Amino acid sequence: MSSKVPVLVTGGAGYIGSHAVLALADAGWPVAVIDNLTTGFRWAVPEGVPFYEGDIEDAALLARIFAEQDVRAVMHFAGSIIVPESVENPLKYYHNNTAKSRALIAAAVTAGVPHFIFSSTAATYGLPKSSPVSEDSEKAPINPYGMSKLMTEVMLGDVAAAHPLNFCALRYFNVAGADPRARTGQSTAGATHLIKVAVEAALGKRETVEVFGTDYATPDGTGVRDYIHVSDLAAAHVLALEALIADPAASLTMNCGYGRGFSVLEVLDAVDRVTNNTITRVLSPRRAGDPDALISDNRRIKATLPWQPRYADLDTIVTHALQWERKLSEIRAGG
């Protein structure tokens, strides 16, 4: 078992970052958070966790945090994640996801931080020629979001070759659900994730759910995606950190998914099942750049880490998302 070193979580007040903070804190790791609260929420960071409101581009602030917290590892979640927005505003994405990551990596190298875990994405693969997608599949992003993340992966590889730093890039598939104890969840207004949108509709926060494309080469004609519970994803980050500490010479790049997919209609059916209600579905044309299916080949992460997903069940994911959506209504009602 590796020693539990102090970890700085960037974007730790956001959706995935706040779950990683809980996973680290629950397992006894010393953890601190930096977040500029552009899309994150101060209340998403647990009491007792040192919190710094600021930007990962702020070298002086990072140097102070690294010194004050004796940081030995970074988990980097800060960034922008909306694919269509990246097409409309590519410079925002190359700034937030690439240039700021460069600043963070530089600060880590200067401070002698030896371990770096990066929140990457299946969007690095673009439109894969086959599914499931393995880590060795061609990287051909079709939008600035995917490219901005791939550029950071390349940077990390080059930095790890030149400096005493090892890294793990985890390429996420479709992250969904919420903390089973409803301590945090997907809280951003106007979120585009299907399960989030569907549970909002189930609770009357939206009138309908739009289904983009019904003519895909899939069993029911709608897009198939690999949905992974956010708490299983957070657990993978902790295990990846242990692996980096155990072998400082090794860096890792791994898919993070369950290796099976559900169609849009199957997800909506699951929400109907869990809520005993019926969501109104609006069938719309395809969106540009959506592949028929995007499913992870997760054999590498299973072979590399002792990762045993605990919530790999669609109805469980939906149940936790729904539970969080109700809690979020209470939080917002309370001001």
Image (tube, rainbow, N blue to C red):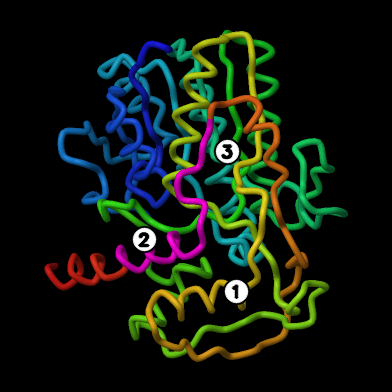
Q: Mark 1 vs mark 3: give the one in front.
A: 1
| Image location of residue 283, percent across then percent down | 64, 89
For label 3, the residue is 99
For label 1, the residue is 266
* Residue type pointed to by label 1: Glu
Marks 2/3 in contact by CB < 8 Å: the verdict is no
For label 2, the residue is 320
Left or right of 300 in this view: 118: left
Range drawn in magenta: 307-324
* Residue type pointed to by label 3: Ala
Whether residue 269 can be seen here:
yes
Residue in the foreground of this view, choosing between 201 and 60: 201
Residue sitting at 56 percent across and 61 percent down?
A: 82
Q: Is residue 153 above or below residue 218?
A: above
Is residue 253 inside the magenta stretch?
no
Whether residue 188 can be seen here:
no
Q: What is the distance, in whole Å, between disc 2 and disc 3 at their CAs?
A: 35 Å
